[in-house]
Image (spheres, helix red, strand yellow):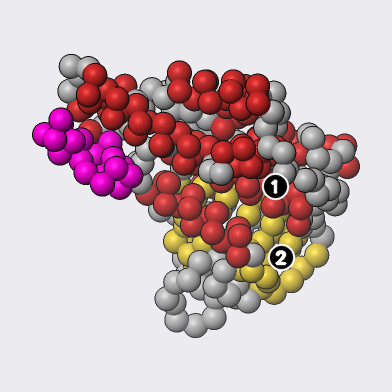
Amino acid sequence: MSPPEPVKILDFSKENASDLLLPQPALLKSSGWDQIYFELHQQPKFDTPEHRGTWHVIAHCPNFPISGERSGERWLDGKLKTEARNQGDIAIIPAGISQICNWRTSAQFTIVAIAPALLEQVGQDLVNTDRMELIPHFMTEQDILIQGIIAALRNEVESTKIGGDLLVDSLKTALAIHLLRNYCTASPPIYNYADGLSTSGLKQVTEYIRENLHRDLKLVDIAQQAQISPYYFLRLFKQSTGTTPHQYILQCRIDRAKYLLHHSELSIAEIASEVGFCDQSHLTRYFKRLVGVTPKQMLRRA
């Protein structure tokens, strides 16, 4: 009898990690995101070897047309279960948990991998991180919020829009909070956020944003200005301003662009770069949406 094969280690901090297990490479995958990774797969029927990941993994079954059954088996944390894999079903495979998976027919599915450090960072003010442990879940149930976050992440992979890194930061923070609340052995408590940020904290954050509009602002960097975790910052900032950081930054960029149109000799393309837009077309699109006219039309009216 031949000895059993060693358990394969799946590390999504490295490129093409899933090629170790699957017959074909991913159709779509993220690049350059911090502590979160996205892949969309279309695969023929397959069986994986036993493997465990260094990151937490969410597997999601989207809607796609196939003939026949798309069910299969998953061996997860020492338990075997047949999964129907209906549209919207998700599986949660915590880091360090062994699994074997198969699909009986062609399959389309999404993988979102999350670094354990992200949950620790978000949960540092909420739970005892020594007791923080994700609970494995088979692909037998739906989660509407996770479906929405995965759809938004896919949209970011497929597009290059203004504020992409900040939006991904917000999405991964929301996903981490949701996992801590609903799929963790230690649930975070509920807090009252009615008071929002302190006056000095809000002033420091908004000044930092206005001084760095030309940069690709990240949520973790903005939250550090108030010396609080991204989890608290998202809630407190919205309580203080009535809007999300992403929406606030977009409005600041448009306001700054309006000022430069009237008070500088810069071209529209140069203004777009100066206020943090990818290019002139991105500035024009959002300017028209928020102001009602394009930058060129505003200049003609001046």
Q: Which region is colored magenta?
A: 281-302
Q: Name which residue type carries label 2.
A: Phe
Q: How many marks?
A: 2
Determine the image quadrant of residue 55.
top right
Q: Position of residue 84 (x, y in %)?
A: 63, 76
Say which quadrant the C terminus sits in.
top left
Q: Position of residue 87 (x, y in %)?
A: 54, 72
Callouts 1 and 2 close, C-beta under 8 Å: no
Residue annotated with mark 1: 177
CA neighbours of label 1 inside 10 A, class few (<14), some (14 to 19), many (20+): many
Q: Position of residue 77 (x, y in %)?
A: 80, 57
Question: Left or right: where does residue 167 sit relative to residue 123?
Answer: left
Mark 2: secondary structure:
strand
Looking at the image, residue 1 lies above or below residue 209: below
Q: Residue at x 18, y 36 (%)?
A: 298
Q: Residue at x 71, y 51 (%)?
A: 179
Mark 1: secondary structure:
helix
Residue annotated with mark 2: 138
Q: Name which residue type carries label 1.
A: Ile
Specify the farthest residue to the bottom: 68
Q: Residue at x 35, y 41 (%)?
A: 160
Secondary structure character of the magenta stretch overall: helix
Q: Nearer the viewer, residue 72 or 159?
A: 159
Alpha carbon separation for disc pair 1 and 2: 20 Å
Inspect the magenta stretch and tell me whether residue 298 lies in it.
yes
CA neighbours of label 2 inside 10 A, class few (<14), some (14 to 19), many (20+): many
Question: Left or right: where does residue 211 sit relative to residue 17?
Answer: left
Inspect the magenta stretch and tell me whether residue 300 lies in it.
yes
